[in-house]
Amino acid sequence: MDKIGLTYNTEKEQIAISEYGRCIQEMVKKLPEIEDRRQRTEAAKYIIGVMVQMNPQIKESNDWEHKLWDHLYMISGYNIDLDGPFAPPVPSEQQKKPQHIGYQNNNIKYGHYGLYIVKMIEAASKEPNEEVKEALAYSIAVQMKRNYMEWNKNIVNDQVVIDDLKAISQGALTLPDETKLNLSGEYYFKKGQAKQQNQPQGKKKKKKVPNLKANMNNPNNPAYKLRMQQMGKM
């Protein structure tokens, strides 16, 4: 820049660990200038305390103190001599790239249901008890519906899920076409049909309450005639 004393951050030295900011880095860079080893160590402990305030999330780990001292050495470029509570980290180990874990090669035709659904279907298909097998098929179908709706962010027809269940299991797990996959309710199976337990009952009709005043003023009402007789009007 043309103005004296003002510089862009892009023109400054790159921050080693951004969580602590540039001020911490400047403080760490000044440590080697302290000639007395004991005073230099005390200054490093003070900087460690400030680093905790700048990045309090680090205290969530069990060995957070060890990590802070390692970060201090890393910020200094491993060029600092201290009497710290932990041995300085080895630069070659810190800069070593982790081993690549590789990619999964699971070819799932119905990827929106997930690999675990496929494994569940494979296990349920081997169930010898037909009643248990049918109950497992329904539970898996309900979970398939949940996964489908979460993946596509849209409502799915129950018949689509039932057909997919049959296709993935190669016909081993089937549900009746009239099966309703309720994500919150419970169902039981009887004679090949899925019936819902605790079905919502229809609205009860309110009983008509007789209007006594209206009936008492009705000339055709026997009670009206009796009242008129008692009053001497009839």
Image: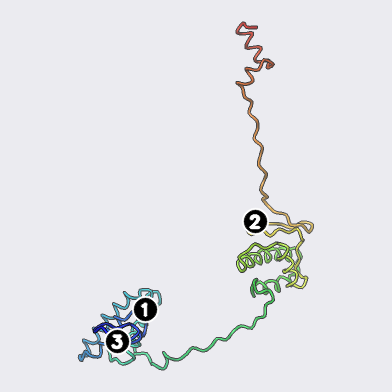
Q: CA distance from mark 1 to mark 3?
A: 22 Å
In front of the other: 57 or 159: 159
In the displayed orientation, state which residue is furthest to the top: 232
Q: Nearer the viewer, mark 3 or mark 2?
A: 2
**Whole-Å distance between the Cαs marked 3 and 2?**
61 Å
Residue mark closest to the camera, 1 vs 2: 1
Circle 1 SS class: loop
* Tag 1 and tag 3, C-beta contact below 8 Å: no
At x 61% / y 83%, what residue is drawn? Answer: 104
Mark 3 — residue?
84
In-front residue for pair 65/17: 17
Q: Is residue 23 found left or right of 165 in the rendered image?
A: left
Disc 3 is placed on an element classified as: loop
Secondary structure type for disc 2? loop
According to the picture, the residue beneath numbered tag 1 turns out to be: 19
Would you name the residue on which mark 2 appears?
Answer: 185
Of labels 1 and 2, earlier in sequence is 1
Q: Residue 187: where, in percent of width, then height?
A: 69, 57
Question: How many marks do you count on the picture?
Answer: 3
Give coordinates of residue 182: x percent, y percent.
66, 58
Q: Amino acid at mark 2?
A: Gly
Which image quadrant is residue 192 in? Answer: bottom right
Q: Name which of mark 1 and mark 3 comes first in the sequence.
A: 1
Residue situated in front as seen by the camera: 4 or 195: 4
Q: Quadrant of the C terminus?
A: top right
Return the disc, 3 or 2, that comes first in the chain's sequence: 3
Q: Position of residue 212 (x, y in %)?
A: 61, 22
Residue 227 in picture, x, y percent from top left: 62, 12
